[in-house]
Amino acid sequence: MYLPTASVPMSFFSDLSGQLYQSFVKDDRYLYIVTGLGNTLLITVLAVILGVILGTIVSLVKVAHSNDPSRFRILNGICTLYLTVIRGTPVLVQLMIMYYIILNGTIINDITTAVLAFGINSGAYVAEVIRSGIMSVDRGQMEAGRSLGLSRRTTMTKIILPQALKNVLPAIGNEFIALLKETSVAGYIGIQDLTKGGDIIRSITYQAFTPLLTTAAVYLVIVIGLSALLTRLERRLRRSDYR
């Protein structure tokens, strides 16, 4: 029997509306996405803060040791080992080691475990970003600070580090975006993040199309928004260079 072509799109939209109802409206299943999004953003923001702090400390130790090999030998060795291990192993494996081995049996909750795992992982990459920013600052800045009577530490923290952070802010912003997507593996330790929320809906409704594409769309919207903010920040930094 011949069916009019108009019935094809009508059938598609009818099926889509039914899937949307089953996936999000029925039993308030949209809350899985909302709760997951909140957990994803919380883990990402806290992990970035931890990563920036840890990365800054590591980069300062590495730079100080490179300028004077007699300083911070033990700390430099620890930092080198940290960078080698963290950058040489997958973030998912690090997350599972943190959950099942390091923090197993402790009172630390899953969210805090994820923040620690992702923050430590991010710190290794941020450290190299900040170290490259410090190295990009003209060496005459250190000499100028010392000639003004400032100590090496004061010159680094008051003169060189602010310039370095300004230079690497866009790169740190990109690390924030990358970390946001990396948190999609948090469900492996039982955290209901955004990806896990979509997968829970899929397991309830046995429909993958709507919940998984919606999850991908939410990630995409967030990344596009962050990329737009990052672009505006870069433009402001470029304008301030000419003032």
Image: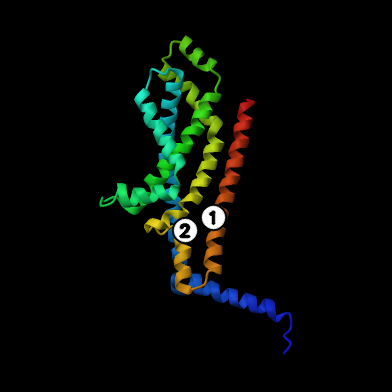
Residue drawn 43% across the image and 60% down it: 35
- Quadrant of residue 187 in the image? bottom left
The answer to whether residue 238 is visible is yes
Q: Position of residue 120 (x, y in %)?
A: 40, 41
**In terms of secondary structure, where does tag 1 sit?**
helix
Residue drawn 54% across the image and 74% down it: 19
Q: Position of residue 179 (x, y in %)?
A: 49, 46
Q: Few, some or many C-alpha atoms within 10 Å of disc 2 (few <14, some 14-19, many ≥20)?
A: many
Residue drawn 46% across the image and 33% down it: 127
N-terminal of the pair, mark 2 or mark 1, is 2
Give the label on residue 118, or none.
none
Amino acid at the residue labelled 1: Tyr
| Foreground of the two, 122 or 146 | 122
Q: Which residue is mark 2?
A: 194
| Foreground of the two, 43 or 101 | 101
Residue drawn 60% across the image and 45% down it: 228
Q: Position of residue 56 (x, y in %)?
A: 43, 31
Q: Few, some or many C-alpha atoms within 10 Å of disc 1 (few <14, some 14-19, many ≥20)?
A: some
Q: CA distance from mark 2 to mark 1?
A: 8 Å
Q: Quadrant of the N terminus?
A: bottom right
Give the label on residue 219, or none.
1
Q: Position of residue 88 (x, y in %)?
A: 46, 41
| Foreground of the two, 113 or 24 | 113
Numbered-mark total: 2
Q: Residue furthest bottom?
A: 1
Which colour style is shown?
A: rainbow
Q: Is residue 8 left or right of residue 54?
A: right
Are circles 2 and 1 on residues that touch, CB within 8 Å? yes
Amino acid at the residue labelled 2: Leu
Residue 147 higher or lower than 93, as above or below: above
